[in-house]
Amino acid sequence: SAGNAAAQEARKGGTLSIILQPEPVTLTPSTNMAQPTQVVAGNIFDGLVAYDFDLKPKPALAERWEVAPDGLTITFHLRSGVKWHDGKPFSAADVKWSLENIWKTIHPRNKSLFENVTQVDTPDDSTVILRLSKPSLPILSVLNGVGAPILPKHLYEGTDILNNPYNNKPVGTGPFVFKEWKRGEYVELARNPDYWEAGKPYLDRLLFRIIPDAAARAAAIEKGEIQYAPYNPVPFRDAERLSKLPRLKVDTRGYEWLSPLLYLDFNVENQYLKDVRVRRAIAHAIDRAALAKIVWFGYAKPAISPVPSSLVTFHNTKLPQYPFDVKKAEALLDEAGFKRDANGVRFTLTHDFLPYGDDYRRTGEFLKQALKRVGIEVTIRSQDSAAFIKRVYVDRDFDFAISYNNAFPDPQIGVVRAFWSGWLGTGTPWTNGSGYRNARADALIQEAGVEGDPAKRIAEFNEFQDIVLGDVPSLPLLELNFFSVYSADLQGIVEQGDQVYSSLKNARFVDAPKAN
Amino acid sequence: MRSDTATPVLSVSGLSVDYGTARGVVHALDDVSFDLAPGETLGIVGESGCGKSTLARAIVRLTDPSAGTIRLGEKDITHASRRDLRAARRDIQMVLQDPAASLDPRWTVGELLAEPLAIHRIGSRADRRGRVADLLRKVGLPPEAAGRRPHEFSGGQRQRIGIARALALEPKIVVLDEPVSALDVSVQAQILNLLTDLQRTLGVSFLFIGHDLSVVEYISDRVAVMYLGRIVELGDRDSLWRRPAHPYTRALLDAAPRIDGPAAPAGPGLTGDTPSPYDLPPGCRFHTRCPNATDLCRHEAPATRELSPGHLVACHFPDTGAEPSSSARFGSGI
Amino acid sequence: MARTDTASLPPTRTDFRDRAVGRLLRRPSALVGLILLAGILAMAAFADVAFPGDPLDMAGSPLLRPGDAAEFPLGTDMMGRDLASGIFHGARVSLLIGGVAALVSLVIGIGIGALSGYYGGRVDRALMRVTELFQTIPPFLFTLALVAILQPSIATITTAIGITSWSGLARLVRAEVLRLRNSELAQASIILGASDARIIFLHILPNALAPVIVSASILVATAILTESSLSFLGLGDPNVVSWGGMVGAGRETIRTDPHVAAIPGVAIVIAVLALNLLGDGLNDVLNGKGERR
Amino acid sequence: MLTYLRRSAAQLVFVLLGIALINFFLLHLAPGDAAQVLAGESGAATPEYMEALRRQFGLDQPLYIQFLRYLGNLATFDLGYSFRQSLPVSELILQRLPATLLLMGTAIGFALVAGCSLGFLAARRAGKLTDTVISIVALLFYATPVFWVGIMLIVVFSVILDWLPVGGMTSVEANLGGLALVGDVALHLVLPAVTLGLFYLAIYARLMRAAMLEVYGQDFVRTARAKGVRLRRIAWRHVLRNALLPIVTTLGVQLGSILGGAVLVETVFSWPGLGRLAFSALFQRDLNLLLGILFCSSVVVVLVNIAVDLVYTLLDPRIELG
Amino acid sequence: MSDPVLAVDGLSIAFQTRRGPLPAVRDLSFSVGRGEMLAIVGESGCGKSLTALALLGLVPPPGRVTGGTVRLEGRDLLALDEAALRHVRGARISMIFQEPMTALNPVLTVGEQIMEAILEHEPVSRKAARERTLALLERVRIPDPARRFAEYPHRMSGGMRQRVMIAMALAGAPAVLVADEPTTALDVTIQAQILSLIDELRREQGTAVVFITHDLGVVSRYVDRVLVMYAGRKVEERDTRDLFADPFHPYTKGLIAAQPRGLAARPQAGPGPAGVARERLTEIPGTVPALAAMPPGCAFAPRCPLADDRCVRTVPPPRPAGSGLVACHHAGESHAI
Ligand SMILES: Nc1ncnc2c1ncn2[C@@H]1O[C@H](COP(=O)(O)OP(=O)(O)OP(=O)(O)O)[C@@H](O)[C@H]1O
Ligand SMILES: Nc1ncnc2c1ncn2[C@@H]1O[C@H](COP(=O)(O)OP(=O)(O)OP(=O)(O)O)[C@@H](O)[C@H]1O
Ligand SMILES: [Mg+2]
Ligand SMILES: [Mg+2]
């Protein structure tokens, strides 16, 4: 944090209480990309790089890196003198091992990105050279501590990685050291005194507290029992209220690396929805601005493309659009041959919403009312997440469903999965839920994946966006703004674009930490 | 009338009933035998818990006997199936002790009286209505009674309804388990009169269970005295009262004061309590309280013997009526 | 021939049932319960008249407080839905859930209790084991599991509540049937030659009804509460308005706009209260406590 | 006594088998499995990864094999392994059990003591204002949804008055130990225990009142009065003890339901108990864990019922275990 | 009778109902002397138990004593407050109830329950109270008192329990013992034991006994004087012998006649029962009127063969007759029937 004068005045030490919700499954981000795991792990595991607010990589464990012009070689120069929390030195071997055994194999998101890495060379302890058979530009977008976690080879080598006991008492190189995980209560991390960045972290202790009920979270934040609460910890309405309190700040920065997008998946095999006119009609029937305002309390903005606007280089603004227009919607439906019956109903659909909280349920309710206006009767179906995943992604026994995906800095990582037909039939969650198949789109996805020329990739993605938005198998609804709430006497708590998944090494209390 | 003068309508032999409970097995009835002649009333007396109700329940097959036989005329109903029993039930009916409890409070008297007819599919609906009126008249209730519910009647009237219901199927035998115990003296007289009248006109046999000796004496032709599940003495009402042979019968008669009896009990009476049915004494069951008990009594159960024709007693040392004390006791009143 | 009883019958008193109702009405608490319940029933019955249209419609601006706008006397919720309309229409659903769930558990409970009590022995032991089983599994957890498995909808919620709440009733009915089976009432019928079915359905069950009716009122109340708890945990049916669902939906704004959850919450409290008061009153009246002093 | 214990043991075995059976098959009816949930939470997953998870969880086996294997494990007191939490189920349960027992015990204790006292008072003042007030308050507690009471208590006592912590079991921040820790836990316990207890308090108050009045109507009370015993002494010595009998019975019956209520209270107060664990296990299709919890709670219920029976025999000499 | 221990005068008890007071006992007067045993007989519901309870101030609500006095050793009990009454109950006047099953507290040992009767009235040590209790148990002929002391009621037979009740009633050496149908629930042989025990105690200790029963046989054997109640009123009060020999009131007559006679009263035992008509019992037709439907005049009038206008209109006042009193307009002429 460049030259913050206040930082010098800021007290060192203190305990920061943080909300963690829900309770993580594991604390090691190797196989589990769930949000709570990452929130904790970001503080324990440093990545090769970290990301700015504009998603440019900046040095972390890698001091420098070079990409060969043909994109087939990437070299990382590692920081020296870094130690694992157990005192063992960190070296290139750890990176190589992690790439080969985790990034390339079991990491749920990165497999395709590292697929073309054919060889990893470690000429010395602080140099790692990736050799690729084809270019894979998005690699540089996932190299933070949770995107490409580096695990201590000496603790993992030769073990069953999925069941390694260190998964739940992680050993990393980050600014905070794992102390204790009391299930159902808290995860405790302590300051890493040997951290490579001198003088950091400031805080002595991070205490991630598990508070399942939203009202209780709000109360805890309000009382100051909790000083940092990322990831929409309280209902929007409460956020509004808390933001007015002088003691608290509500901040939507720090989620740039995620770029979450709320979308509507149409089952294109449905007897009504297979008609693109119907899908377009529905798109016209939804007032996304009102949705953002009423249901999401302004913590969202209408999306116009499957690639969120935060991915500036890839986001295409010249795409077919579906402005809110009930008349147009009705016309399209009439045209498609679905006339209103005596009760004014054209047909009935079932809607499944992502069971991750009331916001999604209310979105469903909003859609129900919106579609009712154009003569589509909607039955909302609620279920838990296991059932939702099975219904949408495995059984494909649904009409239209609402969900969200993180886009991440490169469409290759988070966007194309929703459209690539290669995922069909695999039953993989958060992939192509609509059942969309388009040869051109598939080809574009594949080409962009191995394209070494950034400009060409952009062109490919532009065409891709144009196709999928025209076909609307999946309708982008809103770009969501997640928010964090934190105490006004904290500084350095949001410092980078992947902050929520990164460490709090810059966080510090400006006044005496609250006695508690 | 003696039981041997005609074929009995009911004949019970060697009847035993055991109840299995958490605390152990209760031999509530042990080897009980007797006959009931047509038109006869057999009284059963004994202390609480001696098995009177068990006997009644076993005879109408509310309880399954563990040994012995029950014959209704020629028919053995000891192990009759439910279906066969239904037919048999037309011949043997029972009046329960508590008239308030045995009449469904939700039903009208008419419905209650028609129920047995409906169960056995006798007559049409209209026929039944006639029969009900008939029955009500028989037991001395006005026909309007049919439209009311049991709680609107007094205890005595309710017992009349109970009796009417038992008579609906025109049974040959009616078992009456303490039918007047819950009633006041003045009402009791009404019911006893009703029963005698009914027996005279209908010729039914009664098995009358009671604990009030004067009532049993009044109503019965023959009387059986029970003690701890056994019949200890059985005989003609008069011979039993005049010449009680079993010490228990004698004690029972002594202990029951009557307004026409002596002002003070004849003897010291029995001491001690009835033994627990879970833990029956060996030998003669009465020996723990018997003033004449000997070693023999303590070890060997007495067989039933016939003192005079029809007068049976189960005692090693029955009082044959020679002793002055017993005759003296009755002497004063005669 | 017996002489006719010279005394005429005592004057006819009113019917047992009439008297029970009369006595019920004279109990202040039961009367209050009855009036409240009648009010709720009336709300349910006239929901369509008082508030035509879909209660789920986003009719106004969100989060109006009671009194903010004349057309929304109780205000609106987060989605701008009319709370008053929700309360009226929700009365229907909540009573339906309560009623049907109670019915389900009545059918199971009475069935098991009656068979167990009447036949005794092995049947009894087997059925009571099953009942015990259902008693040992924490009922709410069980309901939760069922709803999660069957996926929340008004039908599954109702069924799940019914399936998990009959065990107490079964025991109660069993005890009653056992008592009545050994009572002179049933024995008199056996002696008359009545069939088991006749005895159970005509004599035993009608007489065991009093405590059953009382528990039924409590069951309805409990079902309404359970539904609200399920909604609180996010397992409600979003297609219909129920009070529980409204409370569940209002909990997000419990700090900022407490009326959204409080109004349906009060409705639940009143309904549960009414049913309990009525149950208490019925209990006193049907079990003759009012007569015996 | 011996036969009683033998019967209880048989009952326990039956109940446990029944629970295993019902839950196992019921839970397998649920759509989706643990691998899907896990994959779903991961934000992305490859088919190979899900296959690996399934194999690891044993979900690739036929159902009856899974069940038999589960029963086999149970026979050796092995509750299995929670793959999701990467810990043995028994360890997870043991971690949470103390908190659960503490919460339930305190809630029940509070409900019993306060409820019985109120019921006692109401019965002694039957028909008077005190009685009416107590009865109405009890009914209100009974009729108000638990979670609602909980949230309101937090708002009033934690946020507005700032007397008590919002939730959790300890002030982890403070690094307390010894007596201070005990005090701290006690402070955290107040609101959840009261919330959970209020509902049962209402039940016990009403039950106690009814039982007292019932006993007051019994002949032996008249006997006591006839021998000139003081009213206060009649209430305490003759009526109370008899009136406790139905309470004890209810206590045993309600234990199961308390654990259910704990789900709500643990949610509202972030109490690290079994109810909450079961709840999340359910949604994560962590069947081993859920089965284990249901199992343990049933064992607890059965054991407490045995204890209740024993207490009953102490209170009521008429009852003999057999 | 000189100086009765207990003198009841004009006792009236009514139930408060919504439709106004419902009189259950009306204008009842009687007295008992030292060592005397007075029986109150009458049909079920005629107010016997209420009267008994009123003697101890124990009329259960909504019942209430609406008039009269109950003087125990000269003191009007009805004027005492609850605290003062408590000192009298169990000490000067005590009571035995009908149901020995339910009249004892099931969860306390019989010893404790008897001791309580002592400790509540006298400032003695527990040890002394225990001694006295053991003596009392001995006194009522309970075998092995030391063991029985620690026994719970459910382990005892009915007769045994009734003895415990008696021991409890005697604990304070009361002047008056009220026994409300103490043997109705017991077997005849046990009844005989209990009755002779009571009889013996009153002779030895001079306790006055108010004995409530509906068993005329028992009355004839044990009791000195009989008070016959009908529908809440005294209809006749006589010395036992006189009463049975020559009842005045038509109700009393009916009651005695309705009793089945034994051999003694039958004309020499007839040839054989069934065939030959048993002589009919004398019935009192009809039933006792309900409290709410009490006729204005003599309550027995609707069932009385002698009833005339006067009976229907006015309540007959008790007037002296023979060794006692009778309340019948036709008392004089009643000999005619
Ligand atoms: N269902 C039963 N289970 C166990 N024991 C029973 C049962 N019914 C009766 N007994 C016992 O059997 C014995 C005989 O009982 P029964 O009812 O026949 O006596 P009783 O002579 O009719 O007595 P009472 O005069 O009191 O009616 C008693 O010891 C009683 O406790
Ligand atoms: N709570 C009450 N309300 C109205 N009447 C009552 C109430 N309790 C008792 N009674 C009536 O009071 C009258 C006297 O009752 P009591 O118990 O004194 O009769 P009893 O002579 O002892 O009868 P029993 O021989 O049956 O014991 C009865 O007619 C009874 O119905
Ligand atoms: Mg009997
Ligand atoms: Mg009485």
Image (cartoon, rainbow, N blue to C red):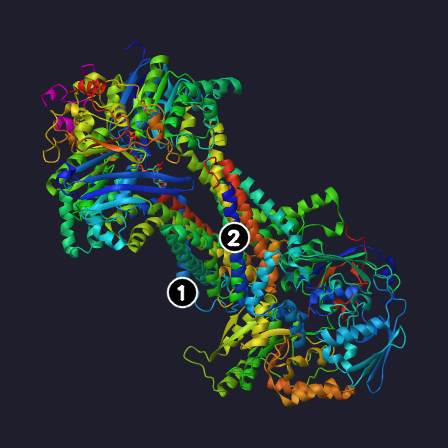
Nearer to the camera, C6 or C34: C6
Does residue A141 appear to the left or right of D110 in the view shown?
Answer: right
For badge 2, the amino acid type reads Thr
Q: Position of residue E64 (x, y in %)?
A: 34, 28
Does residue B57 appear to the left or right of A338 in the view shown?
Answer: left
Name the residue rendered at 38%, 50% in the picture. C120
Q: What element carries label 1?
A: helix
Does residue E164 appear to the left or right of A232 in the view shown?
Answer: left
Label 2 neighbour load within 10 Å: few <14, some 14-19, many 20+: many
Up-down: is A317 above or below E285? below
Q: What element carries label 2?
A: helix
Q: Where is residue A512 in the image (x, y as percent from the top left)?
A: 81, 53
Mark nearer the viewer, 2 or 1: 2
Nearer to the camera, C251 or A417: A417
Q: Name the residue under label 1.
A: C49
Q: Give the range drawn in magenta.
A: E309-337
Q: Is residue A7 magenta?
A: no
Task: Give residue E149's mark.
Answer: none
Up-down: is D156 above or below A165? above
Q: Quadrant of ligand 4?
A: top left
Q: Name the residue under label 2.
A: C136
Nearer to the camera, B298 or A391: B298
